[in-house]
Amino acid sequence: MSAHDRDEAEIEASRAPLMDHLVELRNRLIVCVVAFVVGFIGCFIFADPIYAFLVKPFAVAAQFRAAAGADGAVSPIDLILGTAGLIPVPTVAQDTVNLIFTAPLEFLITKMKLAAFGAVIVAFPVLAYQLWRFVAPGLYRNERGAFLPFLIASPVLFLVGAAMVYFVMLPFVMLFSLNQQIVGGGISAELLPRVSDYLNLVTALILAFGLCFQLPVVMTLLGLAGLVSSTVLASSRKFAIVGIAVVAAFVTPPDPISQIMLGIPLVLLYEVSIWCVRLIELRRGREDVSSA
């Protein structure tokens, strides 16, 4: 019996009536909901330290700026290393970060949003596993082997994008914002962000970077489906760069530094995508030769 016949027999053996599929879908959705609720409760209990953790890049940028003075320059390397905790952060006498909320329940709602965002991240392994267990019986053996690595690569790339936001993007964005303040001469224009606005900024940047970093996964899947080729991707490089610049301008704050910080990694990931599709084409060519 050939490998294709064995796959067909395995799929046929796993075939079930529609009602059984609906029951299985319901059970897996229940597991996903329970995982999300448990993650939400856990994140809500620790919402204060989680929020303080997210505010750290803001605090580091403010402390470096206060130590350097209003007209002093802050080293980008020191800013990144200080956020990562690899070098000591300058200590200043006064508080450097002041977050406010203007509605009685604003901070409570903000913590609930934070808990929901954290619950999705915490419960993602469970969600991905339930998705895999639901679709795996309907896939051929080679399709399972091709699909499984993407379930691993996708969260890894998302975490890389989120880490770039936390350790690089946020400190620079907040330092840039702090430098816009006007203090002196009888005029005071200070940065006093609301807790909800800061959380919205953090989550928007994490989602933007995390989703944009899925570019190799999306392109590789399209390559597996035969919808794109490495030749087309390579010849469309200049159009891709323009598209990346547009996306970076749309999803980042309106300053060139933020756009460059997203644009350069995306260009590199596009090149990685070309090589991933090229490797798929080479492997497919070897399989065609061996089966001929």
Image (cartoon, rainbow, N blue to C red):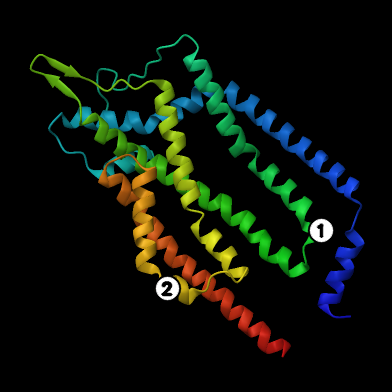
First reached walking from the N terminus: tag 2 or tag 1: 1
Contact, mark 2 vs mark 1 (Cβ under 8 Å): no
Residue 89 in view of the camera: no
Q: Amino acid at mark 1?
A: Pro
| Whether residue 85 is situated above or below residue 279 in the rendered picture | above
Q: Quadrant of the N terminus?
A: bottom right
For mark 1, give the secondary structure.
helix
- Residue carrying label 2: 234
Q: Which quarter of the picture shows residue 285?
A: bottom right
- Where does the image place residue 244, in percent across and percent down from the top left? 38, 56
Look at 52% across and 16% down and name the residue there: 108
Decide: is 230 above or below 217: below
Question: In the rendered image, which residue does mark 1 sit on?
Answer: 137
Q: Secondary structure at mark 2?
A: helix
Crowdedness of circle 1 by 10 Å Cα count: few (<14), some, many (20+)? some
Location of residue 160 in the rendering, given as x and y in whole percent from the top left corner: 48, 49
